[in-house]
Image (cartoon, rainbow, N blue to C red):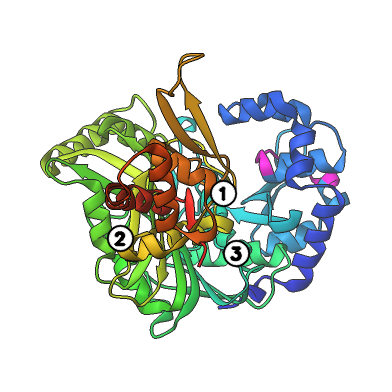
């Protein structure tokens, strides 16, 4: 299927109207203002409706596409090709609306900022608020949100030849891939998602992308890509797929495990796979070993990061909020059944994070698995390869090789010393990253001395000999003791092997 099924002329015309009216991320932000934006985040549309009143173009577009409010037919026809949009299924005309004939949107059309400030547009189903007495349809296509932004900021820099957005939904990741790849393929199990993603691409001026309907890797069987990204239906639930955008028919966190295990079959040598994921925390089952085990034997190196953990009750409330009205018998029944499921499976918590893999086709490939709850530098994509390279280098270096290596302190690393004023020795020495993952490492005096002198021009061994002499220590003891700590610091990105 091609995105050109949405009329190109109509897409170009609507895109021009939206841009001319400043229906962009910055334009919408400025028009709504902080108070109305905060109210919308609380599901309160009244301040935004007040802020967008009148017949001004941007206000009308916001009311129609963003706030899902009807606008007068006369005003709509003055700025939009209403009949063509109605034929394409984006709007409907209500001749009997209170106050006179009105135009209503059948979709949510929101601005999205792409690389280098380019304007993009994302088309999805309108947000459903269960409190209003409605629930999402099973094939509901969710719009771009926080998870979409997280994944887009993970994507490694291009250019690449071929890229795949698996489970494209409204098409937001395909929009980001279009600036990195010569060819973009986007797939989804949900035919409605494929159609709306095609409209998103067309309105954003992306041509030539290929859209396919099907499950997992089925639509691209036998194909390989330099870059695969996915925000899969990872919600862990006792129910079969109630909503295709968030749940699969596979139990637990199996959908994420299967995606990781099969991704290397569709990656070129050196190709990347980057996904968002949920995974379970169970009694007697370490999550790091569990998720790391998904990658074992694939030949991939990579970086797995847990950004958050929720207890079962928090998790159930999060996902019931969008699909069931609070306080109803149905809400209570589903909440109880969900907790029963977690108890039966021994699930004590659910982790959320990302999995980034590089197909090194190497038997000794290693994946760094860790938890990072603090704020890190965004976007992640530009420094992601350095993180993976550091972990692989540290894994491969023997003690002898490390002592012969030329090591330099990584950029943006500073040293901090904590101690009483006037004391001869610090109580604590730490290295802190001012960029990237913003890690902090407590180090000893030998590592601190090494950090102060290593610039990649001399091997580690001779530097340690000089440090040992200055400290009055046995050089052999220092040479034996230091490689383990230095290897960890290389893996965490505080030091880099120069050559």
Q: Residue furthest top?
A: 421
- Count of marks, rendered view: 3
Q: Residues within 10 Å of mark 2 (few under 14, many from 20)?
A: some
Q: Position of residue 297 (x, y in %)?
A: 25, 71
| Residue picked out by circle 1 | 149
| Residue picked out by circle 3 | 157
Q: Earlier in the sequence, mark 3 or mark 2?
A: 3
Q: Position of residue 66 (x, y in %)?
A: 67, 42
Single out the mark in the foreground, 3 or 2. Answer: 2
Q: Could you tell me how far apart the alpha carbons at marks 2 and 1 are, in whole angstroms?
A: 41 Å
Q: Residue at x 38, y 44 (%)?
A: 468
Magenta residues, start to end: 66-75
| Residue picked out by circle 2 | 399
Question: Is residue 435 rendered to the left or right of residue 463?
Answer: right
| Residues under numbered marks 3 and 2 in contact, where contact means CB atoms less than 8 Å apart | no
Q: Residues within 10 Å of mark 1 (few under 14, many from 20)?
A: some
Q: Residue at x 22, y 53 (%)?
A: 290
């Amino acid at each position: 299927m091609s995105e050109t099924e949405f009329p190109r002329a109509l897409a170009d015309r609507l895109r021009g109207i939206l841009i001319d009216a400043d229906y962009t991320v910055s334009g919408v932000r400025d028009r709504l203002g902080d108070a109305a934006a905060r109210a919308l985040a609380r599901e309160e549309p009244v301040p935004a409706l007040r802020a967008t009143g009148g017949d001004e173009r941007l206000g009308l577009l916001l009311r129609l596409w963003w706030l899902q409010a009807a606008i007068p037919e006369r005003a709509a026809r003055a700025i939009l090709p209403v009949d063509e949009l109605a034929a394409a299924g984006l709007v409907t005309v209500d001749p009997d609306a209170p106050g006179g004939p009105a135009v209503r949107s059948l979709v949510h059309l929101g601005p999205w900022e792409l690389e280098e400030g380019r304007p993009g547009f994302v088309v999805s189903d309108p947000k459903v608020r269960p409190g209003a007495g409605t629930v999402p349809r099973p094939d509901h296509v969710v719009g771009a949100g926080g998870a979409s932004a997280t994944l887009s900021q993970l994507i490694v820099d291009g250019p690449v030849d071929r890229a795949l957005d698996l489970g494209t939904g409204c098409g937001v990741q395909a929009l980001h891939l279009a600036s990195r790849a010569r060819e973009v393929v986007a797939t989804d199990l949900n035919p409605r998602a494929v159609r709306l993603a095609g409209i998103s691409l067309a309105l954003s001026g992306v041509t030539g992308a290929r859209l396919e309907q099907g499950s997992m890797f089925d639509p691209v069987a036998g194909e390989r890509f330099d870059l695969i990204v996915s925000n899969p239906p990872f919600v862990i639930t006792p129910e079969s797929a109630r909503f295709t955008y968030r749940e699969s028919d596979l139990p637990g966190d199996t959908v994420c495990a299967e995606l990781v295990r099969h991704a290397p079959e569709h990656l070129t040598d050196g190709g990347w796979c980057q996904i968002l994921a949920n995974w379970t925390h169970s009694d007697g089952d370490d999550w790091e070993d569990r998720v790391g085990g998904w990658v074992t034997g694939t030949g991939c190196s990579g970086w797995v990061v847990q950004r958050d953990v929720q207890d079962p009750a928090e998790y159930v409330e999060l996902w019931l909020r969008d699909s069931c009205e609070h306080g109803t018998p149905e809400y209570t029944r589903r909440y109880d059944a969900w907790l029963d499921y977690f108890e039966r499976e021994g699930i004590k918590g659910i982790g959320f994070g990302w999995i980034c893999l590089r197909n090194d086709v190497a038997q000794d490939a290693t994946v760094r698995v860790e938890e990072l709850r603090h704020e890190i530098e965004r976007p992640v994509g530009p420094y992601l390869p350095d993180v993976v390279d550091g972990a692989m280098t540290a894994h491969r270096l023997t003690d002898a090789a490390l002592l012969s290596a030329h090591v330099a302190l990584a950029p943006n690393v500073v040293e901090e010393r904590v101690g009483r004023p006037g004391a001869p020795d610090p109580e604590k020495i730490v290295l802190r990253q001012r960029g990237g993952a913003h890690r902090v490492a407590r180090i000893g005096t030998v590592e601190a001395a090494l950090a102060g002198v290593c610039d990649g021009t001399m091997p580690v061994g001779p530097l340690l000999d000089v440090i040992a002499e200055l400290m009055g220590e046995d050089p052999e003891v220092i040479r034996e003791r230091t490689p383990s700590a230095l290897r960890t610091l290389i893996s965490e990105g505080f030091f880099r092997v120069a050559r």
